[in-house]
Image (spheres, helix red, strand yellow):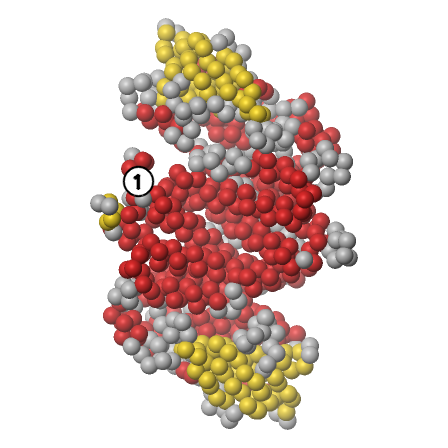
């Protein structure tokens, strides 16, 4: 048990914090607010992060990255949440690049990872389907074998930055007990998008594949390995949302503490009212619970699971972190808005973007209740024992 | 950052667990079940003495005092195993009062009292609260006046738990009525055999007995003063963080959770389903499990902070608030899972696992205000963790 960062982890956190706090100014966020629907993407910032090496935190040195683990990447993600930066860090770095690093072929890694690290290419992930109770088991995206590779037909939803991406990692059902994971390129025949305008205005799309021919060179993995890869990808994405949520919750709460310490009513700062201070204190506890559960999930995900029990411990830690991400995000958002009064909803004041982000993270890849249900089923199955 | 125990820590846990598995004989468990978990019976006394003989009482103490010099994290793990086993270990004596006596008492007191603590033969009750001094403890009125070579003590203490089995009272008394309230308090160690000392029982909601204690011209030698004159407040507060951490130890419920899950997996409803086949029961368990996980991490982080001298006051208070309110909530959820059988006490012939929850419910009602009322803890969090200006009441 150790709760401090190593020196290099501290440096990554400081570097990410410095760039994002300096660059993501209110002015810059406002200009992004004016963007056309589907265009809220701070490309200049993304390139700055690339130049600083931060897009390659968890990409091998052989592919132009820093060669750190997934946990180190979540330090960047927390800062992305803290700054509400409009960048595709979760989808491209925590989702797609992690999956390719662990399960991609040498050729696929060579094709994509150096370009992701340098910011030349953007990847995204398409796991989610509408009305599917689990992101682990694709139902509406179907694959059928072809002469070379597979034909994919179906629809995925909520694909982040899909129309900006150069490659999309797609999960599909091959048969009743076999799944497949492939990379689809948007220019391929039969690929189309339907824009989905989201709460935060992060660009997302439904991805429609109509008999898209996916050659075997674009197949990442299939069979049992595909299930492992999908589980790993989902774990990396869910934990990434938890890390973003940690940063955003912490920032919104601290903004609230500062505001209530300055705002006067009845001739005194409102923070001196116990009802105000105590609600903020509950927020502090919530953020701490979320932070610790997220950090644990990120650390465990960076380990190589030795056996089934270790793999279960990882899955359970991720699920528990997302339960906290949903609950904490919801409570912090309303605490922050409420204690700010009207100022909290005024778009001239920065809180509103945090509230929207907290809501989006809460519902992305499973609400608290959905994860509670999953965890409950696992408890029935193998008890998720306390050590 | 690392969320795994080291090999050495795993070994230590195994050692503690094996030790308590052996210590908790069915006879001792039966005796403890009759005393609402507060100990005091002959088998409990024998177990304490055995722990003393085995060097298991003052594990966190430095080696020269008969301990093993455990780190705060290792000590947390020890308490986790004690709590898991359900042994009513007097951790306030061993972790709080004991170290203060060891480090600050006069030579005579050190010789007379400290070896008994380490040996498991000396019991100490805590005399802090008074009828009019609870959360605002520093307003206590019990007086100690110097008279020649003695101190003369007069006053009343409240909630002096375990005092009816104690050899000494660790007493906070006012020694300078003219100083600001935090600066006129001193600490004393007072034998319960002293003339002028008396007590009457107070029976609580949960069935646990506590006491009101009375001090009428009780005379103790000058060297019964512990630490510096009028510096008692600093002594009292020096161990608070450790006390808070021990109070919310996840060990109080971790094994009970495992047992309850096992029960729900194996126990059938009349319609043929297992208890755990009910969707709401699964969600309840998931709620319990994910909340306990956060508590586990909060406690380990706090213990780690103590060892690395990075203790954040807000985090200690956060642990106290979160843990105590969580236990209250968990005991409710667990009771709901078991149903009306969770109202049956242990001595009911058809009592089941619910009797544990019945017992926990009755003893948990004090934790949110005991050890520092949660409102005050939340104020500390707002001030020390979020830099919010504290309200006028605090000044």
Give residue A10's quadrant in the image. bottom left
> Eyeballing the image, is A160 above or below B187?
below
Relative side of B289 to B19, left or right: left
**Picture mark count:** 1
- Residue B235 image offset from top left, x and y in percent: 40, 27
Q: Give the crowd class for mark 1: few <14, some 14-19, many >=20 residues within 10 Å.
A: some
Q: For this rendering, which residue is in front, B340 or A348?
A: B340
- Residue B224 image offset from top left, x and y in percent: 44, 15
> Eyeballing the image, is B226 above or below B322?
above
The answer to whether residue B374 is visible is: yes
Q: Residue at x 50, y 83 (%)?
A: A207
**Residue found at the far left of this picture:** A267
Give residue B233's quadrant in the image. top left
Give residue A247's quadrant in the image. bottom left
Q: For this rendering, which residue is in front, B74 or A158?
A: A158
Chain letter for mark 1, please: B
Secondary structure, mark 1, is loop
Q: Residue at x 62, y 85 (%)?
A: A143
The answer to whether residue A74 is visible is: no
- Residue beneath disc 1: B391
Q: Residue at x 48, y 50 (%)?
A: A2
- Residue B394 image offset from top left, x and y in percent: 32, 36
Q: For this rendering, which residue is in front, B125 or A71?
A: B125
Relative side of B261 to A195, left or right: right
């Amino acid at each position: 048990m150790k709760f401090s960062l190593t020196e290099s982890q501290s440096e990554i956190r400081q570097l990410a914090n410095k760039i994002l706090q300096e660059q993501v100014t209110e002015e810059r966020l406002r200009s992004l607010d004016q963007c056309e629907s589907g265009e809220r993407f701070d490309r200049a910032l993304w390139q700055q992060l690339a130049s600083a090496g931060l897009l390659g935190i968890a990409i091998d040195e052989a592919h132009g990255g820093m060669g750190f683990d997934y946990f180190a990447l979540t330090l960047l993600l927390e800062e992305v949440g803290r700054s509400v930066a409009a960048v595709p860090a979760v989808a491209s770095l925590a989702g797609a690049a992690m999956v390719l690093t662990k399960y991609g072929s040498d050729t696929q890694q060579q094709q994509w990872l150096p370009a992701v690290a340098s910011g030349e290419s953007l990847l995204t992930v398409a796991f989610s389907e509408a009305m599917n109770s689990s992101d682990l088991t694709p139902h509406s995206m179907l694959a059928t074998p072809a002469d070379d590779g597979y034909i994919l037909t179906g629809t995925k939803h909520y694909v982040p930055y899909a129309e900006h991406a150069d490659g999309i990692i797609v999960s599909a059902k091959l048969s009743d007990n076999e799944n497949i994971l492939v990379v689809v390129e948007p220019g391929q025949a039969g690929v189309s998008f339907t824009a989905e305008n989201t709460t935060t205005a992060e660009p997302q799309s439904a991805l429609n594949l109509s008999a898209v021919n996916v050659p075997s060179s674009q197949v990442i993995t299939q069979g049992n390995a595909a299930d492992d890869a999908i589980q790993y990808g989902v774990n990396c994405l869910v934990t990434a949302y938890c890390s973003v949520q940690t940063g955003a919750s912490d920032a919104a709460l601290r903004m609230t503490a500062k505001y209530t310490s300055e705002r006067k009513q009845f001739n005194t700062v409102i923070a001196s009212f116990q009802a105000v201070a105590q609600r903020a204190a509950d927020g502090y506890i919530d953020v701490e619970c979320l932070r610790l559960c997220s950090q644990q999930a990120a650390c465990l995900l960076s380990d190589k699971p030795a056996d089934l029990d270790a793999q279960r411990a990882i899955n359970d830690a991720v699920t528990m972190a997302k339960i906290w991400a949903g609950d904490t995000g919801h409570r912090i958002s309303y605490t922050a808005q409420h204690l700010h009064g009207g100022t909290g909803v005024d778009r001239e004041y920065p809180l509103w973007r945090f509230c929207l982000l907290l809501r989006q993270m809460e519902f992305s890849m499973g609400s608290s209740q959905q994860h509670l249900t999953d965890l409950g089923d696992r408890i029935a199955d193998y008890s998720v024992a306390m050590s | 950052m690392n969320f795994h125990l080291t090999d050495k820590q795993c070994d230590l846990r195994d050692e503690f667990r094996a030790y308590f598995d052996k210590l908790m004989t069915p006879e001792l468990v039966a005796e403890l079940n009759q005393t609402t978990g507060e100990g005091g019976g002959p088998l409990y006394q024998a177990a304490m003495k055995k722990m003393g003989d085995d060097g298991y009482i003052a594990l966190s103490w430095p080696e020269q005092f008969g301990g093993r010099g455990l780190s705060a994290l290792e000590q947390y793990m020890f308490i986790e195993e004690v709590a898991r086993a359900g042994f009513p270990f007097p951790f306030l004596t061993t972790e709080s009062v004991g170290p203060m006596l060891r480090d600050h008492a006069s030579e005579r007191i050190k010789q007379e009292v400290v070896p008994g603590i380490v040996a498991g033969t000396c019991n100490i009750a805590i005399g802090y609260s008074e009828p009019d001094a609870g959360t605002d403890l520093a307003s206590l009125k019990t007086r100690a006046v110097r008279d020649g070579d003695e101190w003369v003590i007069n006053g009343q203490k409240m909630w002096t738990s375990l005092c009816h089995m104690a050899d000494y009272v660790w007493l906070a008394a006012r020694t300078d009525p003219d100083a600001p309230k935090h600066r006129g308090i001193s600490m004393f160690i007072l034998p319960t055999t002293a003339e002028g000392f008396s007590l009457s029982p107070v029976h609580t909601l949960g069935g646990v007995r506590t006491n009101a204690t009375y001090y009428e011209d009780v005379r103790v030698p000058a060297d019964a003063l512990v630490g510096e004159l009028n510096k008692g407040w600093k002594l009292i507060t020096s161990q608070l963080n450790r006390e808070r951490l021990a109070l919310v130890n996840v060990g109080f419920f971790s094994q009970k959770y495992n047992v309850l899950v096992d029960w729900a997996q194996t126990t059938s409803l009349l319609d043929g389903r297992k208890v755990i086949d009910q969707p709401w029961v699964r969600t309840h368990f998931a709620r319990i499990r994910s909340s306990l996980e956060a508590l586990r991490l909060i406690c380990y982080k706090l213990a780690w902070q103590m060892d690395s001298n990075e203790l954040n006051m807000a985090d200690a208070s956060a642990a106290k608030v979160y843990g105590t309110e969580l236990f209250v909530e968990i005991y409710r959820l667990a009771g709901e899972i078991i149903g009306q059988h969770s109202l049956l006490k242990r001595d009911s012939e058809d009592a089941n696992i619910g009797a544990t929850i019945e017992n926990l419910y009755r003893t948990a009602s004090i934790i949110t205000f005991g050890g520092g009322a949660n409102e005050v803890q939340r104020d500390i969090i707002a001030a020390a963790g979020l830099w919010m200006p504290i309200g006028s009441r605090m000044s």
